[in-house]
């Protein structure tokens, strides 16, 4: 995602790739905003019940870290003419901060301590990255350094739902795996993977390829266990009237 706008203008010079690049760009941005908005139904439930139940706060922590690094990458100090990266990820970071605060407010004490600790770690790591990158005098090296870290943060963000996947398999229930979050992650990853493949940019297609596979895995598990739960409910209903 973070190199998408950085190479957009160079790619648009190629008349063959222009329509495909434009399509991937539009789709990727739409799905990115969809990803930012997708946790809203989950937090409506959390606020209504006054508890985070078995929902995980890790996706919001990892998403915040990714948005902050991508935000920094888009500034003129790291890469010129990439203001849109800063804009999109500033909005994303604001959403993640709100989600983390809401999650912390309704979590149990043990979860509160864990979430606060992880938040401090993320902010500390971002401060180190910010200060450390400014010590690199060569602009190309500085851009590659932050780009590599953004790739690593994307992979971490996509891997964060593994805890939820394990929970779904163990409980055979999709109750605590938000469908719209999984769907938005999958669609956004596919869009940026296709863009990275067309532009032959490993920093784009490698992490988003991993995100595509993990997103597809979540969707398969959702439909499988959601169908199983529905079938079990129907069987129980039939037996109750037998």
Image (cartoon, rainbow, N blue to C red):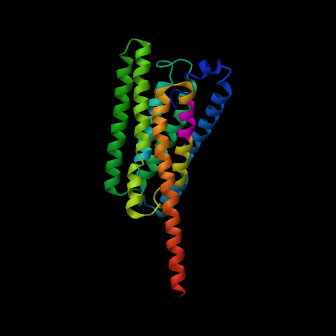
Q: Is residue 168 left or right of residue 32?
A: left
Snapshot quadrant of residue 142: top left
Quick one: 66 or 94, which is closer to the camera? Answer: 66
Q: Position of residue 73 (x, y in %)?
A: 47, 25
Res. 43 in view: no
Q: Position of residue 150 (x, y in %)?
A: 43, 30
Placement of 72 over or under 118, stated as above or below: above
Placement of 62 over or under 106, stated as above or below: above
Q: Residue at 67% of width from left, 23% of height from top?
A: 16
Quick one: 221 or 78, which is closer to the camera? Answer: 221
Q: Position of residue 133 (x, y in %)?
A: 38, 20
Q: Residue at 36% of width from left, 22% of height from top?
A: 131
Snapshot quadrant of residue 146: top left
Placement of 165 over or under 239, stated as above or below: above
Secondary structure predominantly adopted by residues drawn in magenta:
helix
Quick one: 142 or 203, which is closer to the camera? Answer: 203
Placement of 222 over or under 25, stated as above or below: below
Res. 180 in view: yes
Q: Position of residue 158 (x, y in %)?
A: 44, 42
Which portion, as a residue range, is magenta?
Answer: 188-195
Q: Residue at 44% of width from left, 45% of height from top?
A: 60
Residue 240 sits inside the magenta stretch: no
């Amino acid at each position: 995602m973070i190199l998408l706008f950085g190479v957009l203008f160079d790619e648009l010079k190629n008349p063959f790739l222009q329509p495909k690049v434009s399509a991937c760009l539009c789709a990727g941005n739409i799905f990115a905003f969809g990803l930012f908005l997708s946790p809203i139904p989950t937090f409506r439930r959390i606020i209504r019940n006054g508890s985070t139940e078995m929902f995980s706060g890790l996706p919001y922590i990892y998403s915040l870290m990714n948005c902050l690094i991508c935000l920094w990458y888009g500034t003129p100090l790291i890469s010129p003419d990439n203001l849109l990266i800063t804009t999109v990820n500033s909005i994303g970071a604001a959403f993640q901060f709100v989600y983390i605060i809401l999650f912390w407010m309704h979590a149990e004490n043990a979860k509160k301590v864990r979430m606060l600790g992880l938040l401090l770690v993320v902010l500390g790591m971002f401060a180190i990255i910010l200060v450390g990158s400014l010590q690199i005098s060569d602009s190309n090296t500085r851009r590659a350094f932050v780009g590599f870290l953004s790739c690593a943060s994307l992979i971490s963000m996509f891997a964060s739902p593994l805890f939820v996947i394990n929970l779904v398999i163990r409980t055979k229930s999709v109750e605590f795996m938000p469908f719209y979050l999984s769907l938005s992650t999958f669609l956004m990853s596919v869009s940026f993977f296709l863009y990275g493949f067309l532009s032959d940019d490993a920093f784009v297609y490698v992490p988003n390829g991993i995100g595509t596979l993990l997103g597809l895995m979540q969707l398969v598990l959702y439909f499988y266990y959601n169908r199983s739960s529905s079938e079990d409910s129907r069987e129980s209903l039939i037996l109750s009237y037998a």
